[in-house]
Amino acid sequence: MIVFDLTNEDSFTNLDRWRSDFMKKSNSKTENYPFLIVGNKHDLPDERVISKERIEAYCKEAGGLRFVETSAKDNYQVENAFKTLTK
């Protein structure tokens, strides 16, 4: 699971680096590691800078990664994110 902030451009653009860092440190030989991408701070729609369409395009380009939007503050979809991860 890699979590980024829907209100922060830098956190979204760091997804590739975080994925790469994980793969290096885990010594995984799997090219299509099943990451779950989680966009947090869904509770701040007026501050949002990353569109759902942009995230979906990223996930598709990255090999069909799954994606969930959450709000840790409101407990929105948090449980669903963990259930999705375990599937």
Image: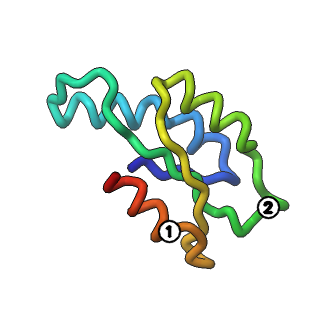
Give the residue at x 39% y 50%. 1
**Which residue is depicted at the point 55% across and 22% down?**
61
* Foreground residue among 78 and 25: 78
Mark 1, Cα crowd under 10 Å, few <14 / some 14-19 / many 20+, is: some
Nearer-N-terminus badge (1/2): 2
Query: Which x, y percent locates residue 50?
Result: 72, 43
Could you tell me residue 44's position as x and y percent?
75, 65
Residue 40 vs residue 79: left or right? right
From this view, report whether residue 42 is shown above or below residue 39: below
Residue type, mark 2 in image: Pro
Numbered disc 1: secondary structure: helix
Outermost residue, front side:
87
Q: Which residue type carries mark 1?
A: Val
Image mark count: 2
Disc nearest the viewer among 1 and 2: 1
Give the residue displayed 49% in from the left and 25% down from the top. Answer: 62
Q: Which structural element holds mark 2?
A: helix
Give the residue number, with chain letter if any, for mark 1: 78
Q: Which mark is residue 50?
A: none
The residue labelled by disc 2 is 45
| Rendered view: 55 above or below 87 | above
Cα separation, mark 1 vs mark 2, equals 17 Å
Q: Residue furthest bottom?
A: 74
Q: Residues within 10 Å of mark 2 (few under 14, many from 20)?
A: few
**As drawn, 61 above or below 17:** above
- Which residue does the image show at 39% across and 62% down from the upper left? 83
